[in-house]
Image: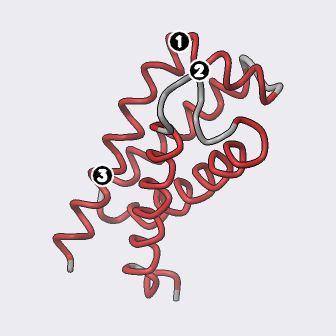
Amino acid sequence: MKKLDVVVAYICSIILIQTLFFKFTGAAESIWIFQTLGVEPWGRYASGVMELIAAIALIFSPTRVYGALLVAGIMGGAILSHLAVLGIEVQNDGGLLFMLALICFSSASFIIYFRRKEFL
């Protein structure tokens, strides 16, 4: 199980890191998302910074559970944004961003459950 914890954390971290390029370079899809939510540009940058912190925390074992808590919060917000405002499919992406948010949220939930004794 310990190896699965590492694999899940790395997968989530890779997903978070690869999406940072689009947030920080101002990709049209990213700008549209945050404009639709009414938080462009500061919301895009803030979420990017928080995702970077979470991705780094996930990589290192002593901080992994805290990174997972941060990811769960960020991705929970992303999932709610998709369901309430954006829709599952954003600009003909076939639901890819929504699916990535679900994968990260699920990964974070697994890590939190797996490391729940660290909270005691």
Q: Secondary structure at mark 1?
A: loop
**Given contact means CB atoms under 8 Å apart, are the residues at marks 1 and 3 in contact?**
no
On screen, 19 above or below 115?
Answer: above
Query: Measured from the top left, where is residue 52 in percent x and y?
Result: 46, 37
Residue 50 location, quadrant: top right
Q: Label 1 to label 3, Cα distance in Å?
A: 26 Å
What amino acid does circle 3 point to?
Answer: Ile
Relative side of 63 to 42, left or right: left
Q: Residues within 10 Å of mark 3 (few under 14, many from 20)?
A: some
Please, which colouring scheme is shown? secondary structure
Q: Label 2 to label 3, Cα distance in Å?
A: 25 Å
- Of residues 100 and 53, the one nearer the viewer is 100
The residue shown at (53%, 44%) is: 98
On screen, 83 above or below 35?
Answer: below
Q: Earlier in the sequence, mark 2 or mark 3?
A: 2
What amino acid does circle 1 point to?
Answer: Ala
The residue shown at (48%, 28%) is: 93
> Which residue carries the number 2 mark?
30
**Label ID, residue 59:** 3
**Label ID, residue 92:** none
Query: Measured from the top left, where is residue 105 in percent x and y?
Result: 50, 59
Q: Secondary structure at mark 2?
A: helix
**Given contact means CB atoms under 8 Å apart, are the residues at marks 1 and 2 in contact?**
yes
> Which residue carries the number 1 mark?
27
Q: Residues within 10 Å of mark 2 (few under 14, many from 20)?
A: many
Residue 16 location, quadrant: top left
